[in-house]
Amino acid sequence: MFPYVRVDLLGSAAFTAVQSDLKGNIAKVRARYTSHPTVSATLEQLVENEKTEKKRVATEGLMWLLRGLSFTCKALQFAQANQSEELATAFGKSYEATLKKFHNFVVKGIFAVAMKACPYKADFYAKLAADPAGGPPVTQDKLNEELNKWLAALDAIVTRLQTFYETGGYNKGF
């Protein structure tokens, strides 16, 4: 049901920068994979094989992609853990915990605006529950079940790769 949670479902132009950043970082990783497929079978191999190069475009792109995915994942986990809390609060908490320390004054301001532009939780969840083929939406219980499974899997992947970056020192120099 959840191949990914689309940032565009947040429905605000304020999230355009976030979506653009995620897409740009995916493009950097994809370009490296495409240009070096035999030494890039895994993301870890892609990073390890780029470390000898002067510019590590894919390594940096993947690092920022992981940070962006961590931000999104944590925000939705906060929202799931507190059903009465609105998305703006959950995304604000996630920003504090994940991205804020990496941003300058200007970017922090952009994120402050974006957090205020979050849709109401009920509206966002209704979009997630909708059937793209036009059928009936899934129930709230099924949505929560599937979203929690998806978030747990995403969190495991992001955590594994962030640990790889930390232990290998791949997050240094950017």
Image (cartoon, grey):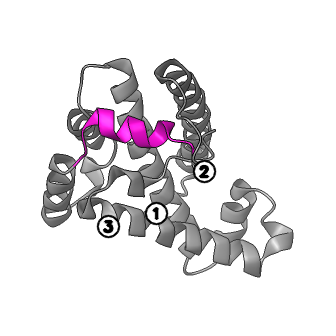
Picture quarter containing residue 14?
Answer: bottom left
Q: Residues within 10 Å of mark 3 (few under 14, many from 20)?
A: few
Q: Position of residue 31 (x, y in %)?
A: 65, 78
Characterize the magenta stretch by its predominant secondary structure: helix
**Does dot 3 land on a helix, a strand or a loop?**
helix
Does the magenta portion include 6?
A: no
Percent across and percent down for residue 148 are 53, 26
| Count of numbered circles in the view | 3
- Whole-number angstrom distance, CA of label 2 to CA of label 1: 23 Å
147 versus 60 height, above or below: above
Q: Which contiguous range is marked in magenta? A: 118-131
The kind of residue on which mark 2 rests is Gly
Q: Residue at x 82, y 68 (%)?
A: 39
Type of the residue with mark 1: Leu
* Residue 174 percent location from the top left of the image: 41, 67
Q: CA distance from mark 3 to mark 1?
A: 9 Å
Q: Is residue 6 left or right of residue 18?
A: right
Q: Which disc is residue 17 wearing?
A: 3
Residue 168's mark?
2
Label 3 or label 2, whichever comes before in sequence order = 3
